[in-house]
Image (spheres, grey):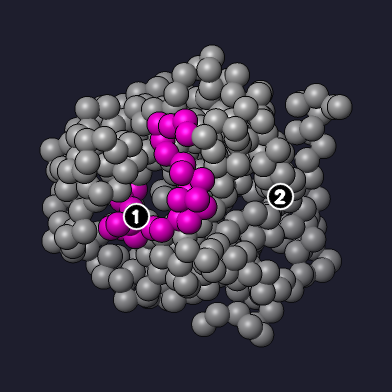
Amino acid sequence: MPGLSQRLADACSIDELRGLARQRLPRGVFDFFDGGADDEITVRANRAGFDRLRLRPRVLVDVQQPDLSTTIAGATSAMPLVIAPTGAIGAGWPNADVAIARVAARLGIPYTLSTMATSSIEEVAAVGGRLWFQLYVLRDQAFAKTLLQRAQQSGYEALVVTLDLVTGGKRERDLRNRFTVPLRPNPRTVFDFARHPGWCWQMLRHGQPRFKNLAGFEGNADPRASIAAKVGQSLDASFDWAALERLRAQWPGRFMVKGVSRGDDAARLASIGVDAIWVSNHGGRQLDGAVAAVDALPDVVSAVQGRVPVLLDSGVRRGTDIVKAVALGAQAVAIGRATLYGAAAGGEAGAERALQILTEELRRALQLCGTPRIADIDASLLHTHGVPT
């Protein structure tokens, strides 16, 4: 059987990295990363939205040396790509947050650290590169303020406030698998873990994944609950426009908001001075039946009228997806599961392979579309029939 390095090198797509991760991980862990809410309608819709879009390539253009570089949120990036925040990924590979951050720094793209990361704000800051910190809005405002202070002191350039999670989604795969972080053995999970000795040995060597940014967090939940459950039950469902403006005043750097799908919300956000709007439905993990992110994108872009940059996540798996999103007006796309699958399959080398695949696909897509620079991507590249308006 080929070794891990060869299996990663042989992976031709993000979907093949997903398959490697699925083989390596216990079912409960894989389902936590892969699954969505309820019937997973929105998970499928995110991909279907990209699949419906068709490209109209130009011909007779010199595309020998395509330029992938662009500007994201006021600074140069090697390509229109951002690493989205992903929580609890240390359950897939020890120190996966740091591993992905290292790859992002080497490639020259921004990395977003989740509140629910299993590496700390300070550990990831030591990696360097363009670092953003994602904040879940907690009722415990004093604790949230300490997270902001730590991120600021550690040199994070942007705060990304998640707006689409006022209560946890119903992820039925996790309920069926009785999945928790920290991992808790029960008859079902013990058998599942034992069938994956390589993963199990890593966890025994490195210890239980912990939400290091939340050390000392008590929340308002059952004290017997996992820290994830405590956070889920301690989200501030009363958080409103006035609260957002107060939070904006506390952060001196770039201030972004994530989880927007409506043009009217986006227009109001632009008017109060956010620095970027991130179109997202949380990868289909919260509200099932929500509009696909790429279908929501044109409405948001139209509403902000160029006042602030617009980013997008949810469903991005191919280099052509990046081209399609930029053609619809996104300044960049963010990926969560793509690098997560890579890291779960092979740690830092797996994350690097995921980004290598997307980079190669993006370069090829630019060439085949007759588009030598990211700046040359516009709506004329899209076949208008069936494009959301």
Residue 27, x across and y down, in percent: 60, 42
Residue 208, x across and y down, in percent: 44, 24
Residue 387, x across and y down, in percent: 60, 80
Farthest bottom residue in view: 385
Farthest front residue in view: 187
Position of 271 relative to 346 (above/below): below
Which residue is the site of mark 2? 15
In the picture, measured across the screen, residue 125 lies left or right of residue 269, that is: right
In the picture, measured across the screen, residue 26 lies left or right of residue 178, that is: right
Residue 257 in view (yes/no): no
Residue at 55% across / 42% down in the picture? 28
Looking at this view, is 241 or 56 the one in front? 241
Tell me whether the residue at label 2 lies in contact with that at label 1, contact meaning CB atoms closer than 8 angstroms.
no
Label 1 Cα neighbours within 10 Å, binned few <14 / some 14-19 / many ≥20: some
Name the image quarter holding residue 107.
top right
In magenta stretch: residue 170:
yes
Residue at 13% across / 52% down in the picture? 246
In the picture, measured across the screen, residue 302 lies left or right of residue 325, that is: left
In magenta stretch: residue 333:
no
Position of 353 relative to 255 (above/below): above
Mainly helix, strand or loop, the magenta region? loop
In the picture, measured across the screen, residue 225 lies left or right of residue 322, that is: left
Name the image quarter holding residue 22.
top right
Give the SS element for disc 1: loop
Three-letter amino acid code at the position of disc 2: Asp
Which residue is the site of mark 1? 168
Residue at 22% across / 63% down in the picture? 272
Give the residues in magenta. Answer: 160-186
Label 2 Cα neighbours within 10 Å, binned few <14 / some 14-19 / many ≥20: some
Give the SS element for disc 2: helix
Residue at 66% across / 39% down in the picture? 21
Position of 50 relative to 137 (above/below): below
